Image: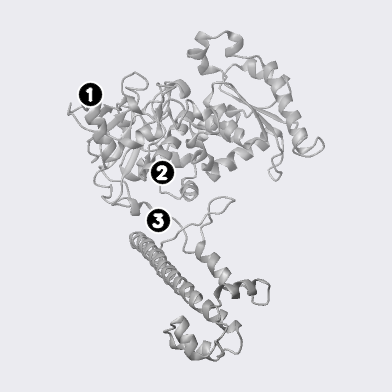
Amino acid sequence: MNGQASTTEDYIPLSTNARGAHFQQHTPPRSPTDTHDHYHSEEIHDDNDADDAELSQLLLYSPSPSSHHFATERRRSSSSAKKRRRVQVLLIYLGLAMGAGVLLGALVRGRRVERYREAVGAGWKYVVGTEEGPGKEEEGERWGGTEVYLKSGNATNGFRENLRPEWTYVTTWNSAGMTNVFEGYCNLIYLALITQRIPIIPPLVPSPSHLGFNKPLPMIDFGEVFDVARLQRAIRSPILEWKDVKRARYGEPWAVSDPAVEGVVQEELGCWSTNQVVRGRFPHRTSLETFLKLDVAYTPVPLSVALPRFPDQSTFWGLAYLTFDEGRRTAFTHDKDVVPGSTLHSKSKVEPDVHLACFDDLYFTNAVDGFEWERDVSPGWRFVGVHVRWNGWIEDVVREMVKRTLGMPTSAEVPPFIAVHIRRDDFDSGFCRSHPEAECHPPLTVFRNRVRQVKRALADKFGPVTKLGNVHDVIVTSDENNATWWAEVRRMGWIYIDHEEERTVERYGKWYPAIFDAVVQSMSIGFVGTQRSTMSRVAALR
């Protein structure tokens, strides 16, 4: 600032009144007896000791007293010019350094892209997303296939022979019903994002409390129901399924007693157990261990992973920390309870795997508060679940079912409707034991009042005479099996998809009545659900 101020002073216009004062300040006193023009060259040299020849010449030939002012200003401006030149040189060097840094960064990124291109091959593509959603698959733009992230393009007899050393991976097992599994797997993918690992998603395991105890039932692949390719593009990160990694009886009716696929080897795997610590229970073992022929040992996570206000739930970054060397060392060094468990079959003590990080249950995992999936702050929802879409064929099947239920021709479009989810059947074995009947199973009149509220909200939002603001159709979804209850639903003027009449189980499998109901809920313009039901919770988010 000082340098700039002096520069401004140096160049005060001489036509202003400031010139005289400035001139008087720098004009040498004249002797009363001096008869020589004091601007003579000798007098200039004697009085001012100017050793600069150019400056002397300027003074010698100045035609007026103001020339002395210019000479003095020249000295001062010369000093300022030197300062400016030094600043300019410094800025030039700084600009060159920044440019070199940008160039180096571009070269490094370019090399990464080249390595990716070499790994994927000639079909390499890269997707650029937009504000409207993930990018389209255009020429030269798509994610690489499983051969980029696995040694083989197909599942092998053992997972270790298929994992590439340059990548790291993370997996988990499922928990309870389909929607709980969905939330847990979205949490898995989010954990993979923050740890820069590749998630390996297991198939969905049939839950006896939801699908019945009649075995065997087939596992169902995550990618059979959900559009994994679109999800990869949306989150800009690869996703694998266990069906890509290791051979098993995917899509076949299967029971624990069934033999494994011929040639498949049993492998030891060390996993972290959240269930032992935050839930205070045994490790969360599932039939997936047998299905994938894994002999798993569990190590309890340290207490530090628990939420302060909800000690029965874990934090994402608390678990993420364990996947890094520093977090792993800290856990084993500072927590005496972090001791590797034994495998179920070989009884070997196996520490949590480094290459394939594994957690027994991620359903009760949150960022900063408990039960975050009940609100839209959940990172599992905001960064993953919001991008998950049904596979196109499932939406097509459900759309035709809805048209038939509404008595519409195939060529017609499905009109806006309100969906209602009334969870009843499996609540009897848990929630209803400790709550009054009116709380556990609210009467249909309560749901009717909520539907009226939704209709008024739609009319206020879109206008009462618009297509979206004047909705009449209400489609009910429920796990209730009582025919009398369903008859009461019809008397209220509501409709439902009759899965027996549609032969849903016969045509698609026992998983699909619940899956198709969830699709119906996601297609609605308004929704009324059941408190404490994860299916209602996710439908409301959708």
Q: Is residue 101 above or below residue 261?
A: below
Q: Is residue 398 above or below residue 111?
A: above
Q: Nearer the viewer, mark 1 or mark 3?
A: 1
Evaluate whether residue 255 shows in this view: no
| Amino acid carrying mark 2 in the image | Leu
Upstream in the sequence, badge 2 or badge 1? 2
Q: Badge 3 is on which residue? A: 144
Looking at the image, residue 436 sits to the left or right of residue 329; the answer is: right
Q: Position of residue 408 (x, y in %)?
A: 72, 38
| Amino acid carrying mark 1 in the image | Lys
Q: Quadrant of residue 247?
A: top left
* SS at badge 2: helix
Upstream in the sequence, badge 1 or badge 3? 3
Looking at the image, residue 111 sits to the left or right of residue 134; the answer is: left
Q: Is residue 394 above or below residue 73?
A: above
Q: Position of residue 147 (x, y in %)?
A: 34, 54
Q: Nearer the viewer, mark 2 or mark 1?
A: 1
Q: Position of residue 269 (x, y in %)?
A: 25, 35
* SS at badge 1: loop
Q: Badge 2 is on which residue? A: 193
Question: Which disc is residue 336 wearing?
Answer: 1
Q: Quadrant of residue 266?
A: top left
Q: Nearer the viewer, mark 3 or mark 2?
A: 2
Evaluate whether residue 136 shows in this view: yes
- Measured Cα–Cα span from mark 3 to mark 2: 18 Å
- Quarter of the picture holding the C terminus: top right
